[in-house]
Amino acid sequence: METVRPDKQTPIPSPEQEAHTVPAPASPWKEAFRQLRRNKLAVVGMFIISFFILIAVFAPLLTPHQVSTMNAADRLQGPSADYWFGTDDLGRDIFTRIVYGARISLMVGFFAVTGALIFGSMLGILAGYFGRWVDMLISRVFDIMLAFPSILLAIAIVAILGPSLQNALIAIAIINIPIFGRLVRSKVISIREEEYIMAAKAQGMKSGRILVHHVLPNSMAPIIVQATLGFGTAILEAAALGFLGLGAQPPTPEWGRMLSDARQYITSAPWTVLFPGLSIMLVVLGFNMIGDGLRDALDPKMKH
Amino acid sequence: MTEPVLNVEGLRTHFFTDAGEIPAVDDVSFYINEGEVLGIVGESGCGKSVTSLSVMGLVPNPPGKIIGGTIDFRHSGGKVEDLRRVSGRRMRQIRGNQMAMIFQEPMTSLDPLYKIGYQITEGLRRHTKMNKKEAHRKAVDMLKIVGIPRAEQVATEYPHQLSGGMRQRVMIAMAMACDPELLIADEPTTALDVTIQAQILELMKKLNKEKGTALMLITHDLGVVAEMCDRVVVMYAGKVVEEGDVRTILKHPKHPYTQGLIRSLPKMSEREERLYSIPGTVPKPGSIKDGCRFAARCPHTFDRCVEETPELLPLAEGHACRCFLYDSLEGGGAHDRSTTAEGH
């Protein structure tokens, strides 16, 4: 026993020896943002997305032509000083349409992700926290939804609701619900077992408060990553629906729609396809780069 | 001093798993007097942690469930409540207020997203009428009491900025903030290195003496028991095998298991090549239906040990032991009692 017995002669607290490692208090979120800024790819991604957000916001100031004004004389013109990105088969300025299209794509991404996030999180929390039959029911519905190829499910939903940009948005939100739902559920289940949740219970906290104050904030990291990546996928899905004629209807300058309208001119007037395609690619790439950066920055294993 | 703060009688906590029903805590009784330090000792898996969680009403359900016994908790006013019978709402009022708990892993027991000060005020604001400012001041005071230097600054820091020892101090500050009558510490020093262990134990002892908080100390470390406890309960495979005051248990252990535990400690006076260890391993709870649960590993096993289940026999004032070795010494009377009590 003597070996383990603490020496009584030791003055009681000498906690100065238990040194502080980090001098300045840094919130875990701020710390993650600092990590993110150090990631070059993520910074590039943020530049790309900021750029698209800016052109979307200031669209009317940047565009030399009207979005839907047709000019039969100038149809299928190549890029020039007047038409920077050329014109399409109806003589509309592609540059103007791309700039206005950014508004549509970012909005679709935003609303589809927000919708999927809200409903997916709610269902995921219910399933993860209450478990048993609630979990069983919600998880099986998710499984069924995920059993379909997502674009097929989106097409089916739009076919029921009728083709329009708004319905495409709703369809994209719906098909993304199980992705967020499963993520939140698994995170809630693992966080629920953390010792600090037990400690919060031992403090007499109500389960609702524990859920909102401890479980949810600690589950945020992968959800934020997924939301960022989801932005990219949602834009891509919207473009796909637009391409199939199930999303935005003419004359809306939606990138996917522009692609599909221009596809017969791919050899004769490649700029009609190039610029919408490039825009979709850049935006999706930007979101994916930020998402990957966030994943690294928020990964608990990367800390210290 | 005579009235127990906590009196547990016949506690049974079982786990219902796919592999069947596992009696993790099987008919466990003990009490803790006001201001007393009770040690609960045993190997991993003997049910000591489940016992503490049962008292707190925090047994994960499913799969765990308390299926029998009473847990009488006496409030400072003298009112006694059976914690098994109170509502969930009432239990939450008691938890963290009259009865607090600290855990084994200080590294994971604090929420990484909140500042230290906030985490202490959370409990204070739940259980007292303090406003934000008062609670924060109290939190800083608590940090000072538990010996954290630069308490004001530490209150604004995040858990990852503190060392393990500091975090355990914070956990103690959190637990003690509402001045509980009973503090349950589940292996509070196991995850810390030896010098910090000593400091944390000193701190808990100091708080126990100064505030009169009864302490239920769960540990597998007999060194900690010798240093801290007034009385000891030794558990083996879900049952209490011996209980008594700390001197009796450490100097004159009666149960062969307790004897084995003490023998297996390294001694400064002797230089042995190998430490003594109790042969065999802890049986899976519920695997032994009849007979003494320690029989397979006991050096004194005889026929009766595998045929009958021994009862906890009082040997002297406040000293009891679950072993037939002492039953036979007392003669037939004790024998009758044990068999009738078993109710075969």
Image (spheres, rainbow, N blue to C red):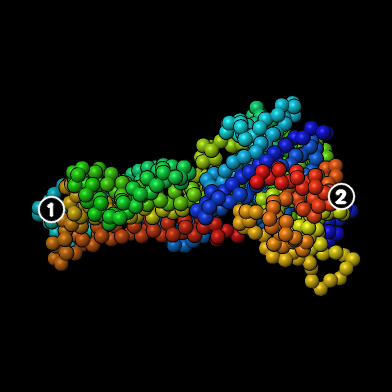
Q: Residue A236: image x %, image y %?
A: 29, 55
In this rendering, which labeled residue sits more in front, label 2 or label 1? 2
Q: Chain of mark 1?
A: A
- Say whether residue B44 is visible: yes
Residue A298 lies left or right of residue A50; in this view the side is: right
Label 2's element?
A: helix
Q: Which mark is residue A90?
A: 1
Q: Please identify the quadrant where the C terminus of chain A is shown.
A: bottom right
The residue that disc 2 covers is: B247
- Measure the C-alpha gap from mark 2 to mark 1: 98 Å
Q: Say which of B97 and A150 sits in front.
A: B97
Q: Say which of B125 and B61 sits in front.
A: B61
- Say whether residue A11 is visible: no
| Residue depicted at 85% across the width and 64% down the height | B267
User: Mark 1: which amino acid?
Assistant: Leu
Q: Residue B11: image x %, image y %?
A: 66, 42
Q: Say which of A160 and A265 sits in front.
A: A160
Total number of numbered labels?
A: 2
Residues at marks 2 and 1, common chain? no
Q: Chain of mark 2?
A: B
| Residue depicted at 56% across the width and 36% down the height | A206
| Residue depicted at 19% across the width and 44% down the height | A160
Residue B91 position by quadrant: top right
User: Mark 2: which amino acid?
Assistant: Arg
